[in-house]
Image (cartoon, rainbow, N blue to C red):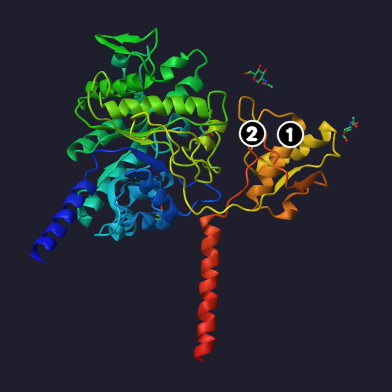
Amino acid sequence: MVPVSILVVCVISLSWVILTDHAQGLGVNWGGMTSHPLDPTSVVKMLKDNGIKKVKLFDAEPDTMNALAGSGISVVVGIPNDKLASLSSSYKHAQEWVKENITKYDHNGGVDISYVAVGNEPFLTSYNGSFVKTTFPAMRNIQKALDEAGTRHKIKAIVPFNADVYEAASGKPSHGQFRKDIKSEMLKILGLLKSNKSPFFVNIYPFLSLQQSSDFPKEFAFFDGTSKPVRDNNNEYDNVFDANHDTLIWSLKKVGYQDLEIVIGEAGWPTDGDKNANKILAKKFYDGLLKKLAKGDGTPLRKGYLEVYLFGLTDEDLKSIAPGDFERHWGILGYDGQPKFPMDLTGKGNDKLLKAVQGVQYMDKKWCVLNNDVRNATLLQFELNYACSQTDCTSLKNGSSCDLDLPGKVSFAFNSYFQSRDQDVRTCDFNGKAKITTDNPSKGSCVFNIQIYSAGVKHQVTCALSIFAGLALMSFLH
Ligand SMILES: *[C@@H]1O[C@H](CO)[C@@H](O)[C@H](O)[C@H]1NC(C)=O
Ligand SMILES: *[C@@H]1O[C@H](CO)[C@@H](O)[C@H](O)[C@H]1NC(C)=O
Ligand SMILES: *[C@@H]1O[C@H](CO)[C@@H](O)[C@H](O)[C@H]1NC(C)=O
Ligand SMILES: *[C@@H]1O[C@H](CO)[C@@H](O)[C@H](O)[C@H]1NC(C)=O
């Protein structure tokens, strides 16, 4: 008996060592801006099925946290930007946040929390400085509250930054420096990161470099080499990912923080909503990135292991499209938890489809389309605009997956609206111009979706059932 129990203890402590080693393995960002969320327990199972050992969240939603409990998956918990003001002005709020969202889960069999991400890209220029003054004080309060709460192993507060916190006028990494308008706040944050031995989280998006500049050389966004590399001192850069990463290193170096560890908090490629957003280019980007990570050669200025969280897990139909229509199409899985294209997360090039989320239930095989009788385009524009103002039409713009004539676009918009309203027959009318069909109207790359039953809906049903059961039991007992 004794040897067996020793063995068990050994296995447990060994797995503990493995579980608490945050350093290795690919991570994925798990966002929740979806109208029909997948069941979190099924998502966690899918993560494990695919060997994904780390996730990064944007909040601390209890169903998600509970699903992650006991999974052995290492978790970055997030604090949304709109909480920064209250957390910066009140230490008590920070203590309450830590108590409710960290301490509660920080026990054996609980959630293996690695970092707390304070805000999300709070210094983005498009926020006009709204969060610049509150980020550091909020982070300081959260770290203090974490330390005071005495977590099992040290949980570190970090800030996930967008790559536009630094710039290099000429495109040469050695010209990198932090943006002037945020530099003084950045220095305070760097000081705290250093004293806690915490990493600098940065989001690097070659797709955005390509999308935002018409003369950006396309091959520089990928990892297959280029005939015109950027030469910088003794280094040569043949992809923008490395160049961007090393621009950060130079920026850190110039203010005396070159020793900070760097984690890529987000990296990925969208599959729709832009002429460069499609499955072929996304696959090309991921293939290159994953192979690079597997080789472990790092970047010219920093050799070795690179810690990366892919963005993101699934498409999110409620994301703001202010930056572009592609925003809702970043998933390596679709809205329904199905893989979009083959990939090999280990970077060995053995491409196959990722394991899908199991147990997803689709609604009926019904679509809402334009009634054939309507042929006057002028009359359709109003309905098209209305439907698209109420639902997701990001696959319709020029260069996206749905290259359709006006009647086709109208059908797509009608269906998108109908599915988003859970196939309610009253939402397939449009002044008599719409009809329900059981013939799949999808054409080529343009997929007319069928909605899924969301975890929330199923949950309500279960609750209702248990209330019924409870009532029945009570009347029986009386
Ligand atoms: C904990 O996190 C959840 C989800 O992000 C949030 O709704 C809640 O307000 C947080 N708790 C506190 C005390 O701030
Ligand atoms: C930032 O300023 C611009 C221009 O003044 C404005 O259009 C935009 O709505 C502002 N954004 C935020 C988040 O305040
Ligand atoms: C289409 O509808 C508009 C608005 O009612 C009308 O002015 C136009 O004459 C119609 N066009 C045709 C070809 O019927
Ligand atoms: C759509 O894109 C194609 C090729 O990119 C271009 O030739 C065409 O003019 C565009 N159409 C519109 C309406 O912008």
- Image location (x, y in percent) of residue 250: 26, 20
Identify the element where label 2 is drawn: loop
Question: 6 or 223: which is nearer to us?
Answer: 6
Q: How far across and down, in percent of the image, does residue 442 sit? A: 67, 37
Amino acid at dot 2: Cys
Could you classify mark 2 by the number of other residues whose Cα lies within 10 Å: few (under 14), some (14-19), or many (20 or more)? Answer: some
Whether residue 20 is visible, yes or no, is no
Residue at the far left: name it: 2
> x, y (%) of residue 362?
59, 52
**If the picture is divided into quarters, which one holds ligand 4?**
top right
Q: Is residue 184 visible?
A: yes
Could you tell whether 54 is left or right of 46 in the image? left
Contact, mark 1 vs mark 2 (Cβ under 8 Å): yes
* Residue found 62% across the figure and 43% down from its top: 449
Residue marked by disc 1? 408
Judging depth in this view, the residue of 219 and 364 nearest the camera is 364
| Residue 386: numbered disc | none
Residue farthest along the bottom direction in this orientation = 478
Q: Which residue is mark 2?
A: 446
Does residue 57 lie above or below 161 as drawn?
A: below
The quarter of the rendered structure image containing the N terminus is bottom left
Residue shown at 43% from the left, 46% from the top = 82
Q: Check disc 1 and give the amino acid type.
A: Gly
Task: Tell which of 407 and 345 is nearer to you.
Answer: 345
For marks 1 and 2, give the CA distance: 10 Å
**Residue 471 in the figure: left or right of residue 57:** right
- The quadrant in which residue 403 appears is top right
Q: Position of residue 37 (x, y in %)?
A: 51, 51
Q: Is residue 462 left or right of residue 383?
A: left
- Classify mark 1: helix, strand or loop: helix
